Amino acid sequence: MKFLIGMHINPAVLDALTDEEKAAIGDGHGRFIEALKRSGELITTQALADPSQAAVVSVRNGQPVVTDGPFLEAKEYLGGFYLIDCENRERAIELAARIPDAAIEGLGVEVRQVMFADGQLEA
C-alpha cells in the first residue's frame, strides 16, 4: 500500500527553534531516509519551496491565468513529503511517528493513503 506522509510547516514555530534544534531535525530526517531506504519502503521524498514562491494557475475563457501564491491563507503549509510503500496504515503511522517534526508542538505530520497513481487505482 502506498501512503503520502505530508509535513506541515508553521514558520513561526520553526523561527522559534534554536540552530541546534533545527540541525537535529535535519539530522533526524537524514537518519529516517536511510532507514526507509534500507527497509525498501521509500519511494521518494521531496522538500517544497516556501508558498510565497508558488504560482496558482487557473483557466478562464480558455486562457491560463497565473497568480502569485500562496493559494491558501494559512499559517501552516505543506513543506515536504515522503511517498512510501508499506504493508498497511498502521505501519505508515508507525513510520510517520519517527519523523522529527512529529515531536515538535505546532508542526504536523499527516498520513494519507494513495488512492490513484500511474493510471491505476491502488489496492
Image (cartoon, grey):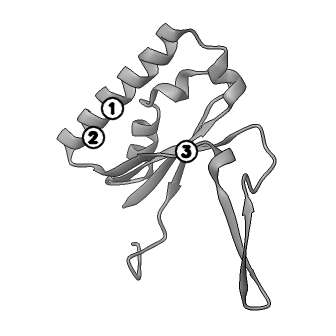
Q: Amino acid at mark 3?
A: Ala
**Residue 15 in view, yes or no:** yes
Task: Point out the tag, 3 or 2, that comes first from the N-terminus.
Answer: 2
Return the mark for residue 36.
Answer: 2
The residue identified by callout 1 is 32
Marks 2/1: CA–CA distance? 6 Å
> Which corner quadrant of the image does residue 34 belong to?
top left
Q: Is residue 43 left or right of residue 5?
A: left
Locate residue 5, reporting x and y percent.
48, 47
The kind of residue tagged 2 is Leu
Residue 116 place in picture, x, y as percent: 46, 74
Disc on res. 49: 3
Q: Dividing the image into 4 quarters, which one contains the N terminus?
A: bottom left
User: Sequence-wise, which precedes: disc 1 or disc 3?
Assistant: 1
Residue type at mark 1: give it. Phe
Disc 3 from disc 2: Cα separation: 23 Å
